Image (spheres, rainbow, N blue to C red):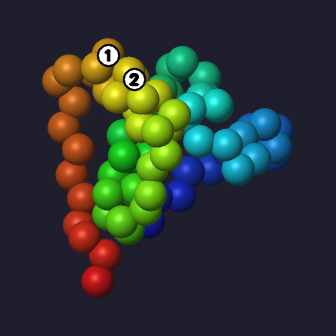
Amino acid sequence: MTLVGVTARSTRQKSDQDPATWMPAPAVHRRYIGESVVTKHRWGLAVDQAEREALLSYVASCPNANLAFERAS
């Protein structure tokens, strides 16, 4: 599981949105996208079409990124 400390304001802004409708500050886009992809994959979570398109778009801007995870038991 990935936990990242954020401000209450950030938590309120994000609410239950996914990368299709909300992104953090540009300085942490890569980390946020990487953690989103790894978390979804690790836990076998569904991704709707809008979220998938957004993730693919952001990942395309990070061609040298490597993602690692351990499958949940």
Tag 2 residue: 58
Residue 63 percent across, percent down from the top left: 20, 21
Q: Give the residue at x 56% y 32%.
A: 20
Tag 1 residue: 61
**Looking at this view, is 17 or 46 the one in front?**
46
**Is residue 2 found left or right of 14 in the rendered image?**
left
Q: Are marks 2 and 1 in contact (CB under 8 Å)?
A: yes
Question: Which secondary structure lies at badge 1?
Answer: loop
Q: Amino acid at mark 1?
A: Ser
Q: Which residue is farthest bottom? A: 73
Q: CA distance from mark 2 to mark 1?
A: 5 Å
Q: Is residue 57 above or below residue 3?
A: above
Residue 26 appears anywhere in the view: yes
Residue 71 percent across, percent down from the top left: 25, 70
Quadrant containing the C terminus in the rendered view: bottom left
**Looking at this view, is 42 or 28 the one in front?**
42
**Is residue 15 found left or right of 6 in the rendered image?**
right
Residue 31 appears anywhere in the view: no
Q: Residues within 10 Å of mark 1 (few under 14, many from 20)?
A: few
Q: Is residue 20 above or below residue 70?
A: above
Q: Which residue is farthest front? A: 49
Q: Give the residue at x 43% y 62%.
A: 45
**Is residue 27 found left or right of 53 in the rendered image?**
right
Quadrant containing the N terminus in the rendered view: bottom left
